[in-house]
Amino acid sequence: MSGHAGFIWSAYAVAFLALGGLVVLSLAARRRVRRQLSARGLDKRR
Amino acid sequence: MASLHFLANPARFRRFTASVLPLLSVVTVLALACGLYLALIESPPDYQQGETVRIMFVHVPSAWLSMLGYGLLAALGAALLVWRHPLAALMARASAPVGACFALVCLVSGSLWGRPMWGAWWVWDARLTSMLLLFLLYLGHIALTHAYDERERGDRAAAILALVGVINLPVIKFSVDWWNTLHQPASVARLGGPSIHPAILIPLLVMAVAMLLLYVTLVLVRTDTEIDRRRLEIATLEPDERTA
């Protein structure tokens, strides 16, 4: 990539880490809250 | 507008989310795979910028979505302050970190693009500075929603910030026209049509659609979680606090 590969791959890595990290955190938070609701017997969707 | 009112009810919103999320997630993954293939393999190098133009495929859609996301935040702020919309505060809490992430990706990828092209990681140029301000507005919004013991006060303060900060959106868009900037002028959303060759424009638009789908998916998932979190908070309140 004409000597600029480090810049290009770093940009994609940052996007992957930031957006992928947000996806993982969002799904983990969703699972955690649903588990807490389930523990209280409130897991039935309203 | 009627569909927005229809989704204003949290129960209806959750039913809608449960029905669209599986398909939306699959389409998002496929669109991202297609966009990355076009951006990294199919698209040719630019005649001036060479291979570094590939940074544009993450940089530009991130910029568009961070601005679109802030527009949504301001609309939700208005819905909360004017109509006391039950879902607006929850969706604003859910969407602000998503917009902040896109703004961060835009700033960092822009810096990584600027170093080989301009010879500098950062310049206090009008476009870059107004984009940094957008990122700080997102952080301010997130901080304000968590700054008060009383959730409603935090949501209202954040809504006011979102409405005041919306003035920054036209500044970002037109900064390259109003001031002499190092940043290049608009090349897609401009009068007279895009000035980019279709071989580069098409991958850019595919990546923009893929990232838009990712944004929508994330906002739906996180809003659904906020609704559950609110239910959990209400369940843990004492009976007299629930009625207060």
Image (spheres, coloured by chain):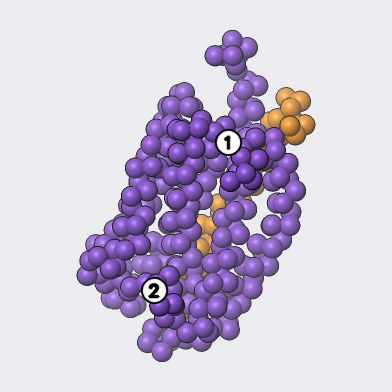
| Residue type at tag 2 | Leu
Who is closer to the viewer here, A41 or B71? Answer: B71
* B212 is higher (above) or lower (below) than B15: below
Q: CA distance from mark 1 to mark 2?
A: 37 Å
Residue farthest top in this picture: B240
Label 2 CA crowd tier, 10 Å (few <14, some 14–19, many 20+):
few
Position above or below: B167 against B196:
above
Residue drawn 44% across the image and 73% down it? B188
Tell me the element at label 2: loop
Q: Which mark is residue B191?
A: 2
At 33% from the left and 50% from the top, the residue drawn is B167
Tell me the residue that label 1 is attached to: B87
Dot 1 surroundings within 10 Å: few (below 14), some, or many (20 or more)? some
Q: Is residue B30 above or below residue B104?
A: below
Q: Which chain letter goes with mark 1?
A: B
Q: Quadrant of the C terminus of chain B?
A: top right
Left or right of A27? Residue B133 is left
